[in-house]
Amino acid sequence: MTQVPPTARTGENFAVTDLGLFSQLRQFTFETPKIPIKAEGKVFLKQILALTSAEISVNNLAPNKSVLFYHKHRLNEEIYIFIRGEGEFQVDDFVFPLGEGTVVRVDPEGERCLRNTSDTEDLCWIVIQSRVGSFEDHTIEDGFGVSKKVTWLGKQQI
């Protein structure tokens, strides 16, 4: 049974959702009307969180399974952050191992695919997709401190 991803709870300056455990992501199936593809264990967050600067997906692939197609992008690079399991990643003609803690960046032109090589453990990862060449600052240069004492009591709960 395919579950509909949860909606977000929002406030003036935030959106929050709870997808549950990564080990249970296979309850969700991503489908698109443009291309006849069903991807079990994949949830895109752009619409759920009303993202405006990137697309983020959370993903789960069962043991001994592979993504069934190569893909590329027109304008966006992808950053894959692996948080559980082990597998292999292919970009063009290069194949390399991956596991918890592996981080991979792929240019838009790179043909990419991945597979779970474990017999028992799910492969779980996060993908961040953003326009190539669009971020030139360092993260620390954008952030700034706020002159306000940190307090947790008496705050509104959502």
Image: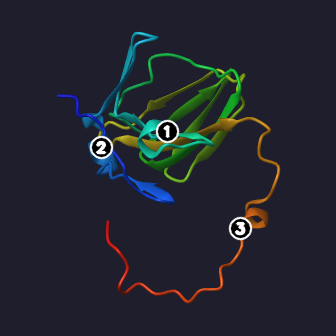
The residue where tag 3 is placed is 143
Count numbered badges in the picture: 3
Vertical position of residue 94 compared to residue 126: above or below? above
The residue where tag 2 is placed is 6
Q: Are marks 3 and 2 in contact (CB under 8 Å)?
A: no
Assess disc 3: are there few (<14), some (14-19) or many (≥20) residues with their C-alpha within 10 Å of its C-alpha. Answer: few
- Which element is circle 1 on? helix
Vertical position of residue 142 compared to residue 125: above or below? below
For the N terminus, give its image quadrant: top left
Residue at image position (77%, 40%) is: 134
The residue where tag 1 is placed is 46
The quadrant in which residue 38 appears is top left
Question: Going from the N terminus, do you reach mark 3 or mark 2 first?
Answer: 2
Is 122 left or right of 97, judged from the image as shown? Answer: left
For the C terminus, give its image quadrant: bottom left
Whole-number angstrom distance, CA of label 1 to CA of label 3: 23 Å
* Dot 2 amino acid type: Pro
* Dot 3 amino acid type: Gly
Is 30 left or right of 51, judged from the image as shown? Answer: left
Front residue of 49 and 62: 49
The quadrant in which residue 74 appears is top right
**x, y percent for residue 4:** 26, 34
Question: Going from the N terminus, do you reach mark 1 or mark 3 first?
Answer: 1
Front residue of 60 and 36: 36
Vertical position of residue 143 compared to residue 138: above or below? below
